Amino acid sequence: DHRNLACTLITGVTFTKAQRKNTHVLISVLGMSGSGKTYSAILMARGLVGPQGKIAMLDTENGSDFVKEICDLEGVPLLVMKSRAFADMKAALKEAEQAKCCAYLVDSYTAPWNELTGTFKEKSKRKRLEFHHMDQLKSMWGVWTQQMLNSPLHIILSGRLGFEWGEEETDEGRNLIKLGTKMKSESEAGYEPSLLLEMESLQDADVRVKQTRMKRGTI
């Protein structure tokens, strides 16, 4: 009967009516220094947790010192762990879940990846990493990714802006060109969030608008 909620195929695979079970969100916020990443992230976290929720924050750059006032004014508890360590990022999420927080903010998401690669170099006594070393690092980072994706908390990742580079053939040879932007973190960090926000300062935005108008001859 097509009206049944489940339909069993000859192969034994069973379909069931879709249900929304995972209601948490994963957001990444990237931008240059001073673009408002931390401020925007804490405001989004405040909106997501509601009036009764708690926010946990892994603070790598003392950003909690600047957003604490917002949480105090809103009456929302802000629990902070100050560390740049990759292991602490994982431990802090587990602790946030045990503390029944509703949101977990990592600021900056760039620091734990840098710490992980730096520690790996130090332990392996290498100044430069080869291609096969990246596979080992990605495997270690993948443990965190699975923990993050399976967490019931809203997670907001704030990180520094980086650039994707490529080569362009010209009459004068090969030139490096910017292909796009990305977060300075593990290479696949941009594929994990359900929402990716790129911040820019008003000054930078104003410069781009003026450059565009000059090209169009309207200024």
Image (cartoon, helix red, strand yellow):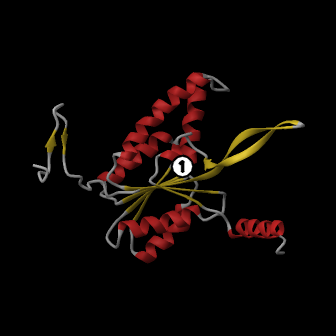
> In the figure, 135 relative to 90: above or below?
above
Tell me if mark 1 has few (under 14), some (14-19) or many (20+) residues whose alpha carbon lies within 10 angstroms of its own.
many
Q: In the displayed image of the protein, which residue is found farthest to the front?
A: 1
Q: Residue at x 30, y 54 (%)?
A: 22
In the rendered image, the residue lying farthest to the right is 172
Residue 70 percent coordinates (x, y): 49, 73
Query: Which residue is situated farthest in the left direction here?
Result: 1
Q: Please provide percent x and percent y for residue 88.
A: 45, 44
Q: Residue at x 56, y 39 (%)?
A: 187
Closer-to-camera residue (103/20): 20
Secondary element under disc 1, as helix, strand or loop, is loop
Compared to residue 36, the image places residue 89 above or below, namely above
Q: How many marks?
A: 1
Depth check: give the residue in front, 197 or 96: 197
Point 59% across, 40% down: residue: 114
Along the line of sight, the residue nearer the viewer: 129 or 96: 129
Query: Dividing the picture into quarters, in which one does residue 131 lie?
Result: top right
Residue 18, placed above or below residue 86: below
Q: Amino acid at mark 1?
A: Tyr
Q: Looking at the figure, which quarter contains the C terminus? A: bottom right
In this figure, which residue is indicated by the disc labeled 1? 109
> Residue 125, image x and y in percent?
62, 22
Q: Residue shown at 61%/62% (left/top)?
A: 199
138 or 103: which is nearer to us?
Answer: 138
The quarter holding residue 99 reads bottom left
Q: Give the percent coordinates (x, y) of residue 59.
A: 51, 54
Compared across the picture, whether 189 is left or right of 154 comes to: right
Residue 18 in the figure: left or right of residue 69: left
